[in-house]
Amino acid sequence: MKYPFLVLLAIFSFKAGASTPEQRGLQVFRQVCSSCHSLNYVAYSDLSDLGLSVVAIKDYASQHQVADGLDDDGDPKTRPAHPSDRIGSPYPSENLARLANHGGLPPDFSRLALTQQGGTARIIQILQSYASAPEGTVLPKGSYYNLAMKHRHIAMPQPLHDGQVQYSDGTSSTIPQMSQDVGAFLEWAAHPHLHTRRKVGVFTLLYLIAMSILVFFLKKRIWKKVKN
Amino acid sequence: MTDKSQDLSRWVEKRLPIVSSFRREYVDFAMPKNLNYLWNFGAFATISLGMLLLSGIFLALNYSPTVSDAFSSIETMDRQVASGWLVRSIHMGGVSMLFAALYVHVARGLYYGSYKAPRELIWLTGLGLLLMVMITAFAGYILPWGQMSYWGATVVVNAFNTVPLIGKALTSWLMGGEGLGNAALHRIYVLHFLTAFSIIGVVALHIATLHVAGSNNPTGIDPESSDETVPFHPYYTSKDGLGLCFFLIVYAVIVFFAPDFLTLAENYVQANPLVTPQDITPEWYFAPFYAILRAVPSKLGGLILATGSIGVLFAVPWLDKSPVRSAKSRPLLRPALLMLFFSFMALGFAGMHPPAGGWLWLSRVAVFYWYLYFLILLPLQSRGETASSLGFAKEGRE
């Protein structure tokens, strides 16, 4: 009698320990992408949608400083970010971001999965298509060889390397694995409240279908008298 | 108790006969009993308008009409405002549903001759509504301040600039300065709100004049006796109700499962006056008119033909002299009219593709046919039809 419960317990504890692709993607974002890319419209608290605890969110937020007006001498002040603050950009301004990246602006991640031509699949492909340039290739300044690009070069240096991130769930962090995880994270960021939306949608549709059936019979009964 | 409440209702009735007029117009009101489901689309449009106004109020509570904050405030609604994603999705999906309902509604009016005497004013107020909805939708699309918002607005501003003599001064006066800035965005926001709520008033006129002449019907011949009519309630409340259920199902699928299907992803990039998108594409409901705008090599010519394409609709009750209403009884007109619907759809598809090669020629042929139909085919064809063909149509009903 005890045995099935133990199995269930084992399954659930395993599930609780496993991180989702989105959570792993967030980990890659925090450790790799966020050193150049912004997430201007996602607030720290939005990460609760990925299953992050309040403590973890507060902890993440408090690692960043945000502008907090001026002090009495007129100098700019900062404070640790609150969960309600947006994750924002690693650079204080767009111009500084360009200065640090050979004039290019690393695109914001908030809706990238939606606005990038080819979507997430294309981003994952780009992340995995770095290679060493063949002999004699002349790359423009600040460009890196990438097979996914039409002209074989991209302004972003190769961001991912095998074993770069220590996944908390023990998944081995190969480049394809990390690319997939980042892709999942970007998908999540670009479609806010997707799970809630689908869940509410299913209930709404079921309700409307039930109502349609009732109204169908109501209408049929009412019009029975009229038909010729 | 009942005596007292009867006294009260009599007291109110004497001063404001609201209950009895509601009963007269929405319960006992005589409707032709042979209306098909195309007659539901007016109710669909009303419901989507209601959803738009209601959701719009809640969006307005969270929106900032400034160049620096507009885009960001929309993102806040989608992400942080409680149920903001739902309200915004209802609003965005509602526009598509409203336009779809209106286009079918207008097409139904054209097909069954609902614009003919004594219903000209229903037609005219209806077209006025269509124009107001278009202005509101255009203004509303600028508000999120994405790339398509900005560049779509730029296309229209540039088109207005080509109006001879007054064009530039007029746009600069309307926009509150050169180009699209804070002043323009604020005005566009006010315009969006103002026209949206003014629509309610014109809807009231539209329905009031409908209730004078009564509904047209698929035969185009007014019912002669009470055998051919049924009271609005419960017959058309139940029929509209059933149609509405299906309409809401489509609406819900868009809102919950495909909110990005009908909109352009490019608009999730903040407006950038320095970067022109590769293709400036309008939302599907403006695509036919955008195709006309681009079918003509001259900007002013495009503007005239695009606005004229709706302008000719206003003249339809007087271009069509035939006493026969329904295209079902007009074998010559029917195929020409169906062709017109196809050319409108062709324009829609052409408007969503770059104006080159086949798409450009398709839009030119389609816009040519649009004008050919209204200015030549419709007046000429209706000449031949006289009261005798009306009799034919009447017999055809039996």
Image (cartoon, coloured by chain):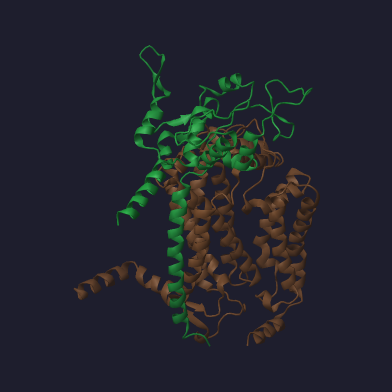
Chain colours: A green, B brown
Report the number of numbered marks.
0
The x, y position of residue A200, in whole percent, is 43, 55
Residue A58 appears anywhere in the view? yes
Residue at the image position 75 percent from the left and 56 percent from the top:
B367
Residue at the image position 49 percent from the left and 85 percent from the top:
A226
Left/right of residue A13 with respect to residue A126 in the rendered view: left
Residue at the image position 43 percent from the left and 38 percent from the top:
A47
Q: Which is more toward the observer, B180 or B76? A: B76
> To which quarter of the image does residue B141 belong?
top right
The x, y position of residue A14, in whole percent, is 40, 44
Q: Which is more toward the observer, B282 or B10? A: B282
Residue B170 appears anywhere in the view? no
Question: Vertically, is B255 above or below A18?
Answer: below
Q: Which is more toward the observer, B255 or B293? A: B255
| Quadrant in the picture for the C terminus of chain B | bottom right
The x, y position of residue B220, in whole percent, is 62, 77
Q: Which is more toward the observer, B397 or A223? A: A223
Residue at the image position 67 percent from the left and 34 percent from the top:
A129
